[in-house]
Amino acid sequence: MKKIVLFTFLLGHLMLCSEISGQETEDTLQQKKEQIISEEKEALKKKVLAINERYNEGEIDAEEAEKLKEEAAEIHALNIENKIAILENSVALSARGGVYKDTIDTNIEEGKDPSRLKIQVFDDEDQLIEISTGKQKKYDKRTHSNLLIAFGFNNAIIEGQSINKSPYKMGKSKFFEMGWTWTTRLAQNSNSVRFRYGFAFQFNGLNPTDNKYFVQDGELTYLEEFPGSLTKSKLRMDNLVVPVHFEFGPSRKIDKGNYFRYSTRKKFKYGIGGYFGFNLRTRQKLKYTVDGSKRKDKITQSYNTSNLIYGVSSYIGVDAFSVYVKYDLNRIFNEPNRKENNISLGLRFDL
């Protein structure tokens, strides 16, 4: 009989404690809900006061002020909805044996999406599980790099002389350019304007006409007829430059779920800019025949060429292919030699 009485007492005590505990849990939950609502209302009030201050100071008009207030109200209403949902779910989680750790920041920074909240849950084995609510941020890569290759015809613009009477062979004088460039999208949500920059090696060649070659005599550099029979005469200037261009053109946005990219495949593009750098080496290559014997000379010297290289360039094309033109603003040969400026026209490939 004593055992039955004792068991009944203990059972009643446990039921009473459970009821009290459940009531306390419900009261605590209600208090937290009220706290969330109070905090969000206070944050909204501060934003409205700041908007009114901007309106009174003439920074925004009445229409813009009203729009900002509506947006702020929507944000904080969504905050309340998300946070209360997380709070209620945490109670259900606790009832199943999980442990909820509140990591919600009630002071969400300006400009951040309030629907992207994170909570941390610890399971029965004390393993951390992180849950994100709302949309995830998409990864945006604004800069990419590529290989630059360009080649074509080279010649010189000579002061007071038509290019048709150039002393350099039109089809034989050539240039080659190779380097590495980076392209950065300038606008936040558009790829219509890009900034391109990098480094490149330029090789500009001039092949004289009429069996002539270059002669350096002190500060003077001039063309002189070769005493033998030339099969090849070429002066090559090797430069290291930094090209910079603003590129314009449409592109297609490709959404990959958690990231997106802009593609210029099969799209028109136009670039304008310039380059600057310095001369690495100037060398003349001669191939000729003397008394029936073939000879080949490679002469490396300054030939009074400019050490500082700078100019303007532009290209127009589709996808990776472009028509390319560049013009050196520096003189080929330093004063007191006549003024000659290197000019190139060819094809450009951004691979």
Image (cartoon, rainbow, N blue to C red):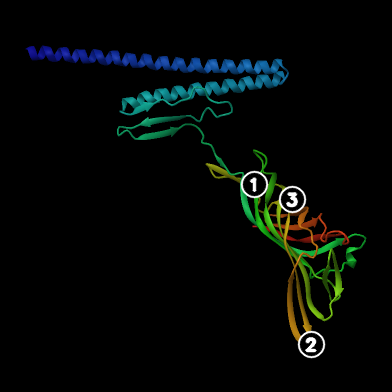
Q: Quadrant of the C terminus?
A: bottom right
- Residue at point 63%, 17% (across, down): 50
Q: Quadrant of residue 49?
A: top right
Q: Could you tell me if residue 148 is visible in this image?
A: no
Task: State left or right for residue 86 relative to residue 177.
Answer: left
Residue drawn at the location 75% of the way across and 54% of the way down: 316
Which residue reaches farthest front? 218
Is residue 29 something that shows in the picture? yes
Give the amino acid at mark 1: Arg
Q: Which mark is residue 342?
A: none
**Viewer-closest of 125 and 242:** 242
Q: Residue at x 59, y 44 (%)?
A: 141
Nearest to the eye among marks 3 and 1: give it.
Answer: 3
Q: Looking at the rendered structure, which numbered label has been put on residue 291?
A: 2
Q: Earlier in the sequence, mark 3 or mark 1?
A: 1
Mark before the other along the chain sequence, 3 or 2: 3
Does 55 sit left or right of 218 as displayed? left
Q: Which residue is denoted by mark 3 in the rendering?
A: 271
Q: Secondary structure at mark 1?
A: strand
Q: Secondary structure at mark 3?
A: strand
Say few, some or many: other residues with alpha carbon within 10 Å of mark 2 (under 14 / 14 to 19 / 20 or more): few
The correct choice, above or below, for 270 with respect to 57 in the image is below
Identify the image quadrant of the N terminus: top left
Q: Amino acid at mark 2?
A: Asp
Look at 64% across and 22% down and name the residue there.
Answer: 68
Residue 81, how many percent across, how many down? 49, 22
Q: Nearer the viewer, mark 3 or mark 2?
A: 2
* Mark 2 or 1: the one toward you: 2
> Residue 63, percent across and down?
70, 20
Alpha-carbon span between mark 3 and mark 2: 52 Å
In the picture of the structure, the residue carrying the numbered disc 1 is: 252
What separation in Å lies between label 2 and label 1 (alpha carbons)?
A: 65 Å
